[in-house]
Amino acid sequence: MADIEIVPVTLYDMDWADMAISESLKRGNPVLARSKEEIKRLIERGNLLKALYHDAGSSNAGLITLEECDGIAELRTLCVPEEYAHRGIGQRLIESLVTLACNNGYEKLYLFASERERGGKTLVEFYAGLGFHDLGKFLKEGKVNEKEIISNLSAIGHPEWYPDLQTKLLNYCYGCQKYQKNLCDEHAMVKIF
């Protein structure tokens, strides 16, 4: 039986982290490209975790990042190589990231998940199964889906969190090609601790 250990990525692992993200992008997974400078910044802050898969040796089996910006915590990158898929590694990485966010003083964790299917479920369904609330599709017809998102935030008792998502839009979405081309299929999601 294999064991999964979640540990911080070190500067020694920087090339591996860069390759893991690049490989995930090549496979068409919905992750953001990261420069080596961004990877180094995440490592130095302790916000880049990796899974070690112990089975007749140890192998790097996935990574996840916690992005902190303007008081908002966001899961931004989750990569698990195909050869380690469906072994619970993604779930363990997410659980560890939630713990990291809690330890850093956050009460909630946002993510944006595409409607892409993986393993018979959409990513939105996968994250919902881990306790994330689906706030709705972030953009509809080229505009922020404000009414539905505020309604869904109200349903979980927190309509006042909408400005967090506006900050996300200003900081990241405007620079995204999917946003610029009106191709964004991402759902805003949040997990409350």
Image: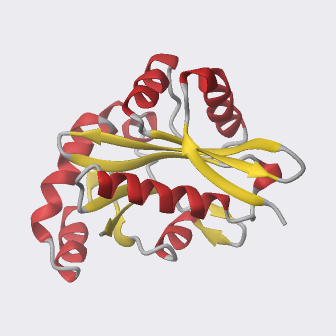
Note whether 179 is above or below 157 in the view shown: above
Residue 101 placement (x, y as % from top left): 34, 53
Image quadrant for the C terminus? bottom left
Q: Quadrant of residue 148?
A: bottom left
Residue 178 placement (x, y as % from top left): 45, 40
The residue sitting at 31% across, 54% down in the picture is 103
Residue 51 placement (x, y as % from top left): 64, 48
The residue sitting at 74% across, 46% down in the picture is 81
Q: Residue furthest right?
A: 56
Q: Is residue 162 visible?
A: yes
- Looking at the picture, tell me which residue is in the foreground, 51 or 56: 56
The residue sitting at 38% across, 71% down in the picture is 134
Direction from residue 177 to residue 53 in the image, left or right = right
- Looking at the picture, tell me which residue is in the foreground, 159 or 180: 159
Note whether 123 is above or below 20 in the view shown: below
Residue 108 placement (x, y as % from top left): 27, 62
Image quadrant for the N terminus? bottom right
Direction from residue 105 to residue 5 in the image, left or right = right
Note whether 20 is above or below 88 in the view shown: above
